Image: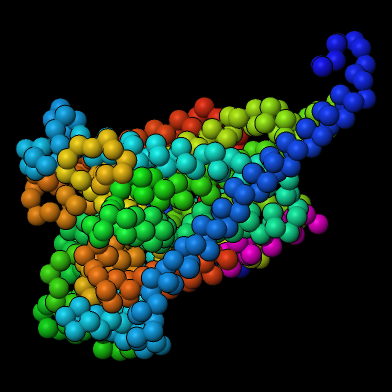
């Protein structure tokens, strides 16, 4: 065999080998991160975590943070879902190929990866600061503000999936309904949204998975609270915020509790994203 | 007044119904449009809110804000250079690592791997994108930074840095400019700009590789088959056919990863060390824009708070343009596909 063939073959082998190595690198880090979270998280799990609050410090648990996380996430999704679905519907059904529609779709894609901490500062400026003026100067962080911040992060995810899913609905369905004289809003609400329902739900679940690990936007909105509270206009703690606080604490007990919290958050997020993908695997959703 | 089934409704009823439908239609349309405009409003609002919050800092320091390394709450003097430097350097390190690895992964998954392996491996890589950033932070702080400082850092300081532990300068440190400075460190812990860059790289690999893989699949099969028929190897097809064909989208994917890396907060806040003093060494602690805000904002007031808002505005504008380029590059390929 002449040398040029040998050289080309060798190059090919090396390149293919390196590509396998690159994949292996990705998988090793995935396994490493998941393994540490599982190992350290499970060994730190105990019953008290779910019953006691963070005010008890080393002898306490994370109950208030878990409840806070649930409330803030629920608020975020409850705010973002109707707005996101309606905005996505407008993009797909009313503004497809109009200039404004294309612009909003494009900017929505940018918002998908916008820095979440800036969204936190935005909500701080429009909700926390004005309400501070109402209370004569005491800073009014609240679970509600945290929910709005998370809603801003969930919104582009829901808009995009709704938009994509509606555009997958065959246009014969629209034409059939319109030819029967159904007004367009009824067509949209009763036929199209129903046809795209599973895809839209997938989008909402993905958005929930996305926001339930968010920490940065909550630091200046929900702030944190060592006591249990169910009142959304009170300061509220959340699991990611407690993890951040405890991980920076010098004590080993605190670190163990941070790992336990990390384990709970990771499991929640991974089950959500795996579940939404398994159930609706027929619908292709990109999440970049 | 409703029409009986089987009978024809009188014209008046039809007209009423048509009017009502038209009214509801208009209302519905405006409601939807309002929601869509909210998306626009959140983008503009975030930009204006941070610009407004940062107005005192911009007014007081002007352009000097961008080039000053000072960050002194005692004397109320603030400059953005240290966090800006940290943000840019960590993101560049992340890209330097993530781009070749992502290309390798995309290549492996689209050309090399046996077909039964592709779906599980690509789902696993995408799983990396689903892990919350705070988990990367925890892992980086408690697992990777100690590992780095025990096994990798000593090698780097003694073989590349100009302050090695044994005092003997390596060939690289003597002959290659800048490298010695980049890898010199007296700092005993792992948390550093380099570690933050490595963890960011792991975080953005799934984004870049999934974009690359997606666009590699858009290359027309007849192009690839023509090249194979002329005797090209898999590598030559990938490098000379697939990559040039998808170049703009690949660059778009890289910029998408860059946008992510620039704005990432929690993972970086855990592992960058959060030092506001400037150091050229990659092994020293530093800070990024996002982690500075996360660390200081709740205790800041007055000019410091305003400076943090100004930093947030800078970050938002820069990531906006990076992501804008990314999306434009990505849509170029779509247009090509449409032809």
Instruction: Point out residue B281 in the picture as x, y percentages from the top left corner.
Output: 25, 79
Look at 28% across and 84% down and name the residue there: B69
Kindly tell me whether residue B131 is visible in this rendering.
no
Start and end of the magenta stretch?
B325-339
Magenta stretch: helix, strand or loop mostly: helix
Instruction: Point out residue A15 in the picture as x, y percentages from the top left corner.
Output: 51, 59
Q: Is residue B71 above or below residue A267?
A: below
Instruction: Point out residue B140 in the picture as x, y percentages from the top left corner.
Output: 25, 55
**The N terminus of chain B is located in which quarter?**
top right
Look at 41% across and 88% down and name the residue there: B63
Look at 92% across and 12% down and name the residue there: B7
Q: Is residue A265 above or below residue A130?
A: above
Q: Is residue B63 above or below residue B105?
A: below
Pick the front one: A241 or A44: A241
Q: Is residue A30 magenta?
A: no
Pick the front one: A1 or B9: B9
The image quadrant that residue B78 belongs to is bottom left
Instruction: Point out residue A218 in the picture as x, y percentages from the top left corner.
Output: 32, 51
Instruction: Decide if residue B241 is on the left or right side of residue A245.
Output: right
């Amino acid at each position: 065999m002449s040398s040029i063939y040998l050289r080309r073959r060798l190059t090919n082998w090396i390149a293919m080998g390196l590509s396998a190595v690159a994949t292996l690198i990705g998988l090793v880090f995935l396994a490493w991160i998941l393994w540490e979270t599982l190992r350290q998280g499970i060994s730190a799990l105990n019953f008290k975590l779910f019953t006691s609050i963070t005010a008890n410090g080393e002898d306490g648990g994370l109950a208030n943070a878990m409840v806070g996380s649930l409330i803030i996430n629920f608020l975020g999704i409850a705010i973002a879902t109707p707005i996101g679905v309606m905005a996505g519907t407008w993009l797909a059904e009313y503004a497809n190929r109009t200039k404004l529609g294309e612009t909003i779709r494009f900017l929505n894609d940018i918002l998908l990866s916008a820095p979440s901490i800036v969204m936190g500062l935005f909500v701080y400026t429009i909700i926390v600061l004005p309400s501070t003026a109402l209370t004569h100067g005491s800073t009014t962080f609240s679970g509600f503000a945290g929910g709005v911040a998370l809603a801003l992060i969930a919104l582009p995810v829901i808009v995009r999936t709704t938009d994509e899913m509606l555009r997958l609905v065959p246009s014969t369905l629209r034409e059939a309904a319109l030819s029967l004289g159904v007004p367009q809003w009824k067509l949209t609400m009763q036929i199209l949204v129903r046809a795209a329902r599973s895809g839209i739900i997938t989008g909402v679940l993905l958005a929930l998975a996305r926001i339930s690990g968010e920490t940065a936007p909550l630091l200046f909105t929900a702030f944190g609270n060592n006591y249990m509270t169910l009142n959304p206009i009170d300061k509220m703690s959340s699991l990611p915020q407690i993890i951040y606080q405890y991980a920076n604490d010098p004590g080993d007990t605190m670190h163990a509790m941070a790992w336990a919290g990390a384990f709970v958050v990771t499991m929640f997020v991974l089950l959500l994203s795996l579940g939404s993908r398994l159930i609706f695997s027929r619908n292709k959703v990109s999440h970049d | 007044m409703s029409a009986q089934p089987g009978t024809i409704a009188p014209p008046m009823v039809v007209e009423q119904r048509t009017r009502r439908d038209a009214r509801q239609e208009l209302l519905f349309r405006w409601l939807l449009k309002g929601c869509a405009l909210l998306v626009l409003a959140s983008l503009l609002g975030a930009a204006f809110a941070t610009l407004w919050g940062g107005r005192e800092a911009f007014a007081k320091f002007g352009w000097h804000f961008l080039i000053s390394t000072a960050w002194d709450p005692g004397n109320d003097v603030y400059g953005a250079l240290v966090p800006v430097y940290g943000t840019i350097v960590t993101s560049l390190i992340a890209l330097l690592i993530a781009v070749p690895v992502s290309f390798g992964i995309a290549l492996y998954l689209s050309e090399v791997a046996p077909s039964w392996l592709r779906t599980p491996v690509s789902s696993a890589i995408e799983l990396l994108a689903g892990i919350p950033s705070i988990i990367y932070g925890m892992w980086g702080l408690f697992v990777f930074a100690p590992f780095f400082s025990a096994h990798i850092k000593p090698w780097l300081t003694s073989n590349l840095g100009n302050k090695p532990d044994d005092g003997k300068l390596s060939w690289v440190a003597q002959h290659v400019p800048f490298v010695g400075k980049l890898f010199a460190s007296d700092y005993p812990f792992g948390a550093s700009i380099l570690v933050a860059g490595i963890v960011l790289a792991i975080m953005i690999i799934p984004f870049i590789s999934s974009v690359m893989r997606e666009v590699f699949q858009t290359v027309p099969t007849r192009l690839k088959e023509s090249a194979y028929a002329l005797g090209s190897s898999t590598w030559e097809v990938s490098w000379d056919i697939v990559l040039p064909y998808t170049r703009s989208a690949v660059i778009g994917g890289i910029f998408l990863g860059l946008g992510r890396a620039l704005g990432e907060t929690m993972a970086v806040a855990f592992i960058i060390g959060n030092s506001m003093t400037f150091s050229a060494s990659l092994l020293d602690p530093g800070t990024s824009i996002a982690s500075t805000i996360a660390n200081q904002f709740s205790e800041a007031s007055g000019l410091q708070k305003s400076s943090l808002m100004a930093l947030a505005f800078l970050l938002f504008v820069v990531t906006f343009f990076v992501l804008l380029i990314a999306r434009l590059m990505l849509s170029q390929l779509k247009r090509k596909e449409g032809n």
